[in-house]
Image: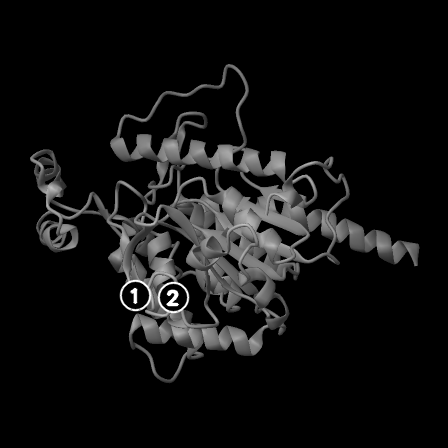
Amino acid sequence: MGEPFIGLPRDPSPYSPRLRTALVLTGTGTAGAYHAGVLRALHESSVRFDLVAGDGVGAIGALFAALDGAAALWESDGPWRPPQVRHFYKRTRGWRLRRLWNRSGGRSDPRRRARERVWRRVTGPPLDCDKTTGRLVARLWTLVSSGAGSRGGSDGELGARAAELLLENLGQPGFRELVLTVHDLDAQRDLVFGLLAEARRRDFFQPRDHDPASRSAEAFDLAGGLRDRAIDVLTAALRVPLVTDPHVITFPVESAWRGESHYVVQRVGSLVRLVEEVVRTGAEQLIIASASPEPIGPHNLRAARTDRLGRFGDCLMSAEAAALRDVQAKAARLRVFIVRPHHNPLGPFDFAGAYDPRSDRRHALDELMQRGYEDAVRRVIDPVVTLRADEVAGR
């Protein structure tokens, strides 16, 4: 996978609607609102993209956009609007007791799941997103059942129906191929889940010559034996390391992991891996949406956050900014268009808004969504409109 990323100078050509294009959504927490604004701008301007990929909270936008349901993300009752969004990651009680348990050596018990399961019920992690996942699942049921019919089944049933709907409609307007990444804590490797058109599926999941076993242990086809795991992948992508419990994914017996159950979470900074997998699908042009603001220059330092979640959120944003820089430096053969805000005062966990000392006022999440819309217009849509006007004038 390394060959498309090195060796050639960057192509200075402008955005081209004729190339196979992938939309990549990356980030944590409140970045999902920014993604919703970007998706709305692309939708209203009829900008075509063939594949949508996501890691972290970007998995939400990717899954909904692949199923032609992105409008549910920016509507007035969508998941990024108050009051639903205020408790996206809900604080839990008793996590201090769990920390004391860990210090006392509780993790040394070899029956890790049996013993840890008891203490999760008693103390819980610092943050929980189960209710948010439940709301997203309910919206997905409405989407796959077209607002009617059977709803409320198991996550496996929903994942299978979503996969079938996407397979049946690939190539139709509004439906796109899908790639998602999460991280397997037990296997210590990234996992890639894809649902692609038949013409590209075999090459994408085919083992690499130098390490065939690795590919079968990392890449999984949502159109095959794991088509019922799409909701598991979405749930795992929302689990932020250190502040939420990991999600458990059980692999089929016939898979490379032989029926094992693994702890799976989001991996911060996995954008480079996600882009590598997108390139493997044949993408020639990337639109990357990230809520991480543009790097600052000298004499622009700000005071560090004093709250723990805020400080941790700053670390997440910094890691994402570094990952964006890595992609820009390595993706020499690709046309890469990064949609990101010039300034973003909201950290990943500031769902209720945050005070911005630079503007001396409080910023709300709705503003971040609107900023995503405006940045997409400026970075992608205006060049496309200009190109189309030039083509018409040249005829």
- The residue shown at (49%, 76%) is 165
Instruction: Give residue 233's position: percent from left, percent from top.
Output: 38, 60
> In this orientation, does residue 371 appear?
no
Few, some or many residues within 10 Å of mark 2 (<14, 14–19, 20+): some
Judge left or right: residue 297 versus residue 360: right
Give the residue type that dot 1 points to.
Answer: Gly
Q: Nearer the viewer, residue 366 or 249?
A: 249
Instruction: Give residue 95's position: percent from left, percent from top.
Output: 14, 42
Which residue sits furthest bottom?
149
Above or below — where is 33 with respect to 8?
below
Q: Which residue is mark 2?
A: 255
Which residue sits furthest front?
210
> In this orientation, does residue 303 appear?
yes
Instruction: Give residue 172's position: percent from left, percent from top.
Output: 62, 74
Numbered disc total:
2
Q: Which residue is mark 1?
A: 259
Tell me the SS state at disc 1.
loop
Judge left or right: residue 305 versus residue 163: left
Instruction: Give residue 227's position: percent from left, percent from top.
Output: 42, 71
Q: CA distance from mark 2 to mark 1?
A: 7 Å
Check if mark 2's residue and mark 1's residue have beta carbons within 8 Å.
Answer: yes
- The residue shown at (63%, 62%) is 50
Quarter where residue 46 is shown: bottom right
Few, some or many residues within 10 Å of mark 1 (<14, 14–19, 20+): few
Give the residue type that dot 2 points to.
Answer: Ser
Quarter where residue 28 is shown: top left
